[in-house]
């Protein structure tokens, strides 16, 4: 059920893109896919139908909880983005989304990356889903030590090359370009997530203020030293006048 597992995690990830950073979503999908594969392969007789509780009464399958924790995703935030009463039903050749309340069944409209009819990885069909591939880990089993291949999912990471302008316009954790429009007005931007150019400007303003503060502090210390010197000189003059008057 490799294709069905890949379709399942791709279906769940499609609800998370645009709100949670893409890297965390892809990592979550990779971990969940491998946990589902382990659950099916560790059984002596893999079930013909597998149900995955996604979001029913605020509860999720332990596999989803563990995958979200390992991907540093907040489970409550993730559940708020997923449909309520959602159960995913996987069976050989099909993946269905089941409503736990109404028992309605709907087939997700997504294609597997392993399907020969799927579009290019840069096409519209694959734009909003994790890119997973199948690898094999070989182990020696039995008394004869015959090698046995065990499949697992691995995330395809793109070695993207950016220009200086394109990289400056990205946010950490996402490769989606962000506009500078509305930054100065404070329209929903956080100082630590705004484009790099704005962050550099804020840093320069801070350093300039810090330099002015340092200069002002040095001048204040110098004035205090001058006042102390004048006070000492006056004290000496008074002592001299007093001693001269006695003589």
Image: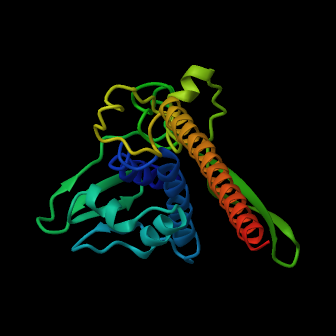
Going by the image, does 64 lie left or right of 105? Answer: right
Q: Could you tell me which residue is drawn at 58 percent across and 45 percent down?
A: 216
Please, is residue 47 above or below residue 98 in the view?
A: below
How far from the left and from the top, in percent, is residue 57?
Answer: 21, 74
Residue 119, how many percent across, how many down? 46, 27
Q: Which of the 4 quarters of the picture holds residue 84? A: bottom left
- Of the pair 176 and 186, the residue shown nearer to us: 186
Q: Residue at x 38, y 59 (%)?
A: 91
Vertically, is 95 above or below 169? below
The x, y position of residue 185, in whole percent, is 29, 33
Q: How many marks?
A: 0
Q: How is the image coloured?
A: rainbow
Which residue occupies 62% across, 25% down?
A: 162
* Residue at the outermost left position: 102
- Residue 223 lies, with reference to residue 32, above or below; the image says above
191, 2: nearer the viewer: 191
Which of 206 and 183 lies nearest the eye of the viewer? 206
Q: Residue at position x 56%, y 20% from top?
A: 165
Residue 152 percent coordinates (x, y): 63, 57
Q: Spot the residue most to the right.
A: 144
* Relative height, residue 186 to residue 240 (above, below): above
Q: Quadrant of the C terminus?
A: bottom right
| Horizontal side, residue 135 vs residue 10: left or right | right
């Amino acid at each position: 059920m490799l294709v069905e597992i890949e379709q399942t995690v791709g279906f769940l990830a499609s609800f998370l893109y645009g709100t949670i950073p893409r890297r965390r979503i892809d990592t979550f999908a990779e971990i969940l896919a491998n946990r589902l594969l382990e659950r099916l392969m560790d059984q002596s007789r893999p079930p013909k139908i597998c149900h995955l509780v996604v979001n029913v009464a605020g509860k999720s399958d332990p596999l989803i909880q563990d995958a979200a924790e390992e991907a540093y995703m907040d489970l409550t935030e993730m559940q708020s983005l997923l449909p309520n009463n959602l159960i995913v039903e996987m069976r050989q050749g099909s993946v269905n989304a089941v409503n736990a309340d109404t028992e309605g069944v709907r087939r997700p409209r997504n294609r597997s990356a392993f399907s020969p009819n799927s579009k290019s990885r840069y096409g519209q069909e694959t734009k909003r889903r994790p890119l997973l591939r199948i690898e094999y880990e070989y182990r020696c089993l039995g008394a004869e030590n015959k090698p046995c291949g065990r499949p697992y999912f691995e995330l395809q990471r793109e070695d993207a090359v950016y220009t200086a302008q394109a990289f400056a316009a990205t946010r950490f954790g996402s490769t989606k370009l962000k506009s500078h429009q509305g930054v100065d007005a404070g329209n929903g931007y956080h100082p630590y997530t705004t484009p790099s150019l704005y962050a550099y400007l804020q840093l320069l303003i801070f350093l300039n203020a810090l330099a002015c503060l340092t200069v002002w502090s040095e001048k204040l210390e110098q004035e205090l030293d001058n006042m102390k010197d004048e006070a000492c000189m006056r004290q000496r003059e008074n002592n001299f006048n007093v001693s001269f008057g006695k003589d």
